[in-house]
Image (cartoon, rainbow, N blue to C red):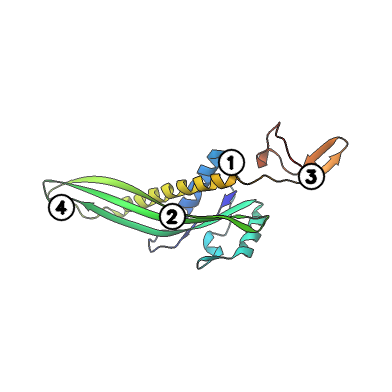
Amino acid sequence: FFVLPFMNDTPFNDDGLGTIASTELLRVVKGTNKAVVPEDMRSADTSRDFFSGDKVRLSPLLREGKRLGVTLLAIGKIKHVKYRQKGDDVGLFRQKKAIAAVTIEMRMFDIAEGKEIISVTRAGDSTASQTNVFGSDDSDNPKEQRLELVQEAIRNSSRLIAGDITRALEKISWEGRIAKISGGRVYINDGRASGLNIGDILKVK
């Protein structure tokens, strides 16, 4: 299982947001032990290379998945980013709350079967509070804090999508092929790196 860096399809100008989304997805899915996530895998492509509007360029995506050697490949978009502040404008102590809300779309494909397995859209948010004394600078939060809130909202959205992925993985049967038969021994073309453990029982079709 692998995720390409997400496409940032919003006016919020930070290309690193797409990498945050894909990295968080990989981290959470790997922690569930429901899929094998390759270590240190890299691709020169990103999700942007496989989107054409709302449609996916399936043939190039499948070729990239085969080149990477993965069974499942996911791509996605950051579709909406909103940031706002609210709070009191009167009184000696003025309480302000900053809110970042993000909407993410993820689409996962079975490379061998050449088909889409799931498509989900999730929204997440992040908040921070601040108390200003009357007469102090209570203008908008610095860009750094705004970016941190948006990044955390992306991570929260990604964790929700990771839950959708793990539920989908539970419905997918593992498949391998017989590589060799020698006497009474049957060798298959996968092993521990594909999630197999000693004692697992396999069904031959």
Q: Quadrant of residue 205?
A: top right
Q: Quadrant of residue 93?
A: top left
Q: Report the amino acid beneath label 2.
A: Leu
Q: Report the amino acid beneath label 3.
A: Ile
Mark 1–mark 2 contact, CB under 8 Å?
Answer: no
- Disc 4 versus disc 1: distance between alpha carbons? 50 Å
Any mark on residue 45, and which? none
Q: Is 68 rendered above or below residue 183?
A: below
**Can you tell which of label 2 and label 4 is closer to the viewer?**
4
* Total residue callouts: 4
Any mark on residue 34, and which? 1
Q: Is residue 5 visible?
A: no
Residue shown at 34% from the left, 48% from the top: 126
Q: Is residue 8 visible?
A: yes
The residue indicated by pointer 3 is 178
Q: Is residue 130 left or right of residue 114?
A: left
Q: Is 198 rendered above or below residue 26?
A: above
Any mark on residue 17, and which? 2
Q: Earlier in the sequence, mark 3 or mark 1?
A: 1
- Disc 3 versus disc 1: distance between alpha carbons? 23 Å
The residue indicated by pointer 4 is 89
Q: Secondary structure at mark 4?
A: loop
